[in-house]
Image (spheres, rainbow, N blue to C red):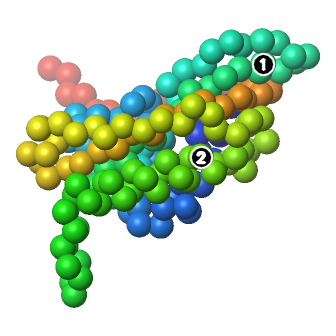
């Protein structure tokens, strides 16, 4: 098992706890406005990442460490048929609060390698004039949890399995 399986478990748990999300993804780092601009993602959305670890110690064949996780939720103005419009500032405040609650109650996320409840849960409104100008609002929630990383085989990568290339040689 690995940090990637823990991140996947967190993503699935958050998607269940926050049914208004249209997308939930694991990303390589703290999500930013630049990431949103690179690809079209249905909103509201959650982006989960591991920010690193501290205090690794060996216990038998395992490594026990404190992992630092983050989720950034992103919302925009909501305009559904037959429903009063919801401004993004209200939507992100509600979604941010519900995300804090989901994380604080997250326990082990259904993953046996997570060995403690979330601690040091904090959240921040990630308002920027640039995001506001694009009708977006973002809220970040961070927390720490103890994890027990067991020995695992590296993922098999098929070198060039998906590459198709043609060249015209002069």
The residue shown at (87%, 16%) is 59
The residue shown at (58%, 40%) is 7
Is residue 45 shown left or right of residue 135? Answer: right
Residue 107 position (above or below residue 121): below
Viewer-proximal residue, 75 or 123? Answer: 123
Q: Element type at marker 2? A: helix
- Total labels: the figure holds 2
The image quarter containing residue 62 is top right
Residue 95 placed where, x, y %? 38, 57
Q: Element type at marker 1? A: strand
Viewer-proximal residue, 92 or 51? Answer: 92
Q: Which mark is residue 104?
A: 2
Farthest bottom residue? 82
The residue shown at (74%, 36%) is 116
Is residue 155 shown left or right of residue 22? Answer: right
Q: Which residue is mark 1?
A: 63
Q: Earlier in the sequence, mark 2 or mark 1?
A: 1
Residue 127 placed where, x, y %? 22, 40
The image quarter containing residue 5 is top right
The residue shown at (77%, 28%) is 148
Residue 162 placed where, x, y %? 44, 38
Q: Nearer the viewer, mark 2 or mark 1?
A: 2
Is residue 116 shown left or right of residue 122? Answer: right
Farthest left residue? 133
For label 1, the crowd category at 10 Å Cα-Cα, with few meaning under 14, some 14 to 19 and many 20 or more, is: some
């Amino acid at each position: 098992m690995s940090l990637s399986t823990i991140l996947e478990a967190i993503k699935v748990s958050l998607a269940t706890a926050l049914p208004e999300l249209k997308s939930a993804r694991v990303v390589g780092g703290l999500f930013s406005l630049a990431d949103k601009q690179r690809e079209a993602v249905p909103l509201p959305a959650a982006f989960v990442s591991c920010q690193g670890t501290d205090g690794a110690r060996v216990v038998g064949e395992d490594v026990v460490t404190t992992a630092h996780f983050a989720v950034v939720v992103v919302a925009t103005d909501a305009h559904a048929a037959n429903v009063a419009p919801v401004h993004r500032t209200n939507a992100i405040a509600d979604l941010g609060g519900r995300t804090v609650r989901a994380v604080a109650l997250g326990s082990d996320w259904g993953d046996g390698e997570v060995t403690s409840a979330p601690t040091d849960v904090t959240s921040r409104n990630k308002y920027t004039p640039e995001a506001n100008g694009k009708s977006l609002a973002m809220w970040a929630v961070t927390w720490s949890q103890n994890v027990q990383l067991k020995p695992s085989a590296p993922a098999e990568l098929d070198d060039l399995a998906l590459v198709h290339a043609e060249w015209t040689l002069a």
